[in-house]
Amino acid sequence: MTEHPDLGPRPQLGYTSSAIDRAADRRSDDAALAKFLRHDRAAGYVVGGEMVVMKQRRDSADPLFSPAEANALGPVRETIFLGLLDEAPRFGFGLDAKSIEPLKARDDLKITDLRSIAVHGLVDATHLPLLAEAKAALVGWHARHRFCPNCGMPTNVMQGGWRRDCPACKTEHFPRTDPVVIMLAIAGDRCVLGRSPRFAPTMWSALSGFGEPGETIEEAVRREVLEETGIKCGQVKYFMSQPWPFPSSLMIGCHAQALSDAIAIDRSEIEEARWFHRDELALMLGRRHPDGLTTPPPVAIAYHLIRSFVEDGCQVLG
């Protein structure tokens, strides 16, 4: 693995490298969970809808609240046990979205969305994996699954927030994560990037799409590239993965060998796609492109897929 002289050290991928011990064996121990909430170092993250509540500091923001502080902000609908960090219990506290509105008037709080927190570096990067776990995988899931999809009855929170049980039909419900493949189709010193209508006007990114039932990662990569650009792919090599809490996906990053060259865009999927040379991509990564073109920020796995190709070329395919 090499580093491009104009790009500096490779940054950490957002929402990864969590240091938490999830302590899954303690989730069914109600007495232990109650003790963790009373622990003098217990703290957690307060989420309501898409918003994260933080304490406003002079030059930064503190996302951790004690259980008492969290409950003082508004009615906590769900308390999720995230695990232990250096033996200190960590939780996610779920507020109703409407409870967030009056908090926005307070000058001792900073309230914003998780994407902004990550992109603008509002908190130490060590908090990002836990914020993703709290916001997307659990608090967001609970807000959407308070009733049993099997019989429609209200469900109960179990296992420290990692399960909801229906008392009527006895069905157990678990948080879901949706697999998404995100990939670069590569031919020599070029790769294909695309644009979605929701992107910033200058940004180009890797192609992506949801994996389908009964499909391997490799099959999903080939299908998505073919559907969006008309390009056929052969070899597919896994690169890295990233929890993506918008709302709850696992991004599976891959590089793929392009077997064709002509692009035929499916405009119901993307608005544009084209080939980029590695030299042009280096300018985009470094925010030095003459036309102002850019890649996604380092918090996104697309940045790392592109940078790996810029620095290592076809070697990324092995």
Image (cartoon, grey):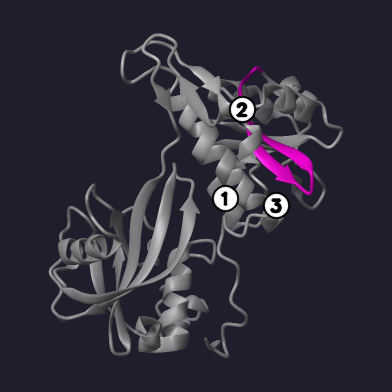
153 shown above or below 21: above
Camera-side residue: 196 or 219?
219
Report which quarter residue 93 is drawn in: top right
Report which quarter residue 80 is drawn in: top right
Label 3, on which residue?
123
Give the residue type that dot 3 points to: Val
**Of the residues under marks 3 and 1, which one precedes in the sequence?**
1
- How far is mark 1 from mark 2, CA to CA? 34 Å
Give the residue type that dot 2 points to: Ser
134 shown above or below 205: above
Label 2, on which residue?
28
Secondary element type, mark 1? helix
Q: Position of residue 299 (x, y in %)?
A: 54, 61
Q: Residue at x 30, y 63 (%)?
A: 195
| Label 3: few (<14), some (14–19) or many (≥20) C-alpha neighbours in 10 Å | some
Residue 30 is left or right of residue 132, and the answer is right
Residue 116's tag is: 1
Q: Nearer the viewer, mark 3 or mark 2?
A: 2
- How far is mark 3 from mark 1, CA to CA? 10 Å
| Label 1: few (<14), some (14–19) or many (≥20) C-alpha neighbours in 10 Å | few
Is there any visible trace of residue 141 in the rendered image? yes
Q: Position of residue 170 (x, y in %)?
A: 40, 15
Residue 225's tag is: none
Q: Position of residue 205 (x, y in %)?
A: 37, 67
- How far is mark 3 from mark 2, CA to CA? 31 Å
Q: Residue at x 46, y 83 (%)?
A: 283
Report which quarter residue 228 is drawn in: bottom left
Q: Magenta stretch?
A: 75-92
Residue 153 is left or right of residue 266, and the answer is right
